[in-house]
Amino acid sequence: MEENIEQFDLTIIGASLAGNYLCYLLSKTNLKIVVIEEHKEVGLPFQCAGIISQKLSKLINLPNKLILNRVNIAKIISPSGSFIKLSGADQPYIIDRIALDRFYYDKVKNKKNISYYLGEKFKSFKYVRHNHIKFLLIETSKRKLKSKFLVGCDGPLSLVAKSFGIKNKTIPAIQIRINANFNEDEAVMYFDPRWKELFGWIVPEGNKIYRIGMACSKNLKKNFRIFLKKLRINLAHRIDQQGGLIPYSIMNKLAFDNVLLLGDSACQVKATTGGGIIMLLTAAKYAAICIQTCFKIKKFTKSFIKKYYEIPCKSTIGKELKIHYLIRVVLKDFNDKDFARLFQIVKTSKIENLVSFYGDMDFPKSFIFKLIKNPLVIPFLIKHTLKHPNIFIKILKILNK
Ligand SMILES: Cc1cc2nc3c(=O)[nH]c(=O)nc-3n(C[C@H](O)[C@H](O)[C@H](O)COP(=O)(O)OP(=O)(O)OC[C@H]3O[C@@H](n4cnc5c(N)ncnc54)[C@H](O)[C@@H]3O)c2cc1C
């Protein structure tokens, strides 16, 4: 073992929201922490629509300056143009995502026990033993360092996850910001079989600026042009443009010897909306408790990390993420008529004002419960599943995971 290399208790890869928030949660401990980020500036590139349910302010102390707008209505538009407007009690936030990432970074960056190495890429790690104790020897583009614990907050293409043979399934997304004249009180979702894995979105940032985006696995650029044409938006007038990848599946395995995964690297993202922020903030709290317990008890085995991190995550957000994926599997085969029928059921059951798309969809069990109270929903779903028997097989596979 090289003696002159830097030593840390905890190494976090990725200084986006998951990495910075976890670092903040642990900043008051006496752990020596390093965060490694391949980009030179925290918060960039910006890759988010920034719409988050009201639960955000229950999870964190959300400063007003990070809130750009709030919306009352989620308008869901079918391929034929019919729509429903969901407007329950939740008023989701439209946040300044760059500022949110920097908010936690600014809180911890000058602390004595914390180092940020920006513009530096994590490359690999290996397990080493020193005086019979297991450590990680981590290699970045600039140095080698020794660490007792490693957290992969390195996003959808996580190299930390790949070290354990985990490769996230992802969907590419594109977004522009543009001045336009839509309703500033509505977030809009356009469903269409051409972009069936997710939807096209309009998110009002405030001051007549809108975030217009789409995620789909095939022909993204072409479909986005079709979408913009439908909205009568000229791409040339955009303020700026973003792109990114959205992990798309159920939650990964999270625990390994001396290592855990958090955020997009762990696929802690809702397959129905592509939203990951509520999930990763929830998981980060479990991760922080787990890491402190590991150092207190001096135990860093996979089974210990599983007990204090993976199992609590699985029994809370993991279950919900599975339901999101199940909903997505069912929606994927929806055609025009299916959407029209479902919208009709929602309208006749008069739940438009009771269901809040963003609030209820964080934890969709309540959303489903409100839907299936309507006696028409179950026969509709049975009929749909019988028409597409492959759904049934997929559902069984997901439930068995
Ligand atoms: C277009 C788009 C719109 C979205 N809209 C919403 C939304 O409206 N609401 C919502 O809740 N969620 C949304 N999401 C999802 C949300 O942005 C993610 O869930 C969230 O950013 C995940 O945070 P993270 O810290 O886990 O990963 P990331 O934000 O992906 O950050 C990973 C970090 O790791 C760094 N990194 C990666 N590899 C390395 C390496 N080898 N070495 C060093 N550093 C590395 C990256 O540079 C990056 O800073 C959206 C995502 C996209 C792409």
Image: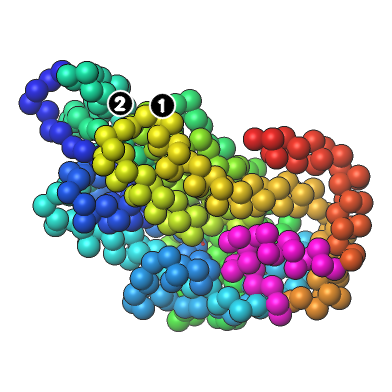
**145 left or right of 94?**
left
Instruction: Mark yes or no: residue 366 visible.
Output: yes
**339 left or right of 144?**
right
**341 left or right of 31?**
right
Q: What stretch is highlighted in magenta?
A: 353-374
On whether ligand 1 comes within 8 Å of the CB at mark 1, the answer is no
Image height check: is 367 above or below 209?
above
Disc 1 to disc 2: CB gap under 8 Å: yes
Residue at which label 1 appears: 163
Residue at the left extreme, as displayed: 4
Question: Which residue does the image show at 27% across and 52% down from the upper left?
Answer: 26
Question: Which residue does the image show at 25% across and 45% down from the upper left?
Answer: 35
Secondary element under disc 2, as helix, strand or loop, is: strand
Rendered location of residue 124, percent (x, y): 31, 27
Image height check: is 79 above or below 317?
below
208 and 153: which is toward the camera: 153
> Which quadrant of the rendered structure holds the N terminus?
top left
Q: Distance between the residues labelled 1 and 2?
A: 8 Å
Rendered location of residue 120, percent (x, y): 24, 39
Q: Which quadrant holds residue 153?
A: top left
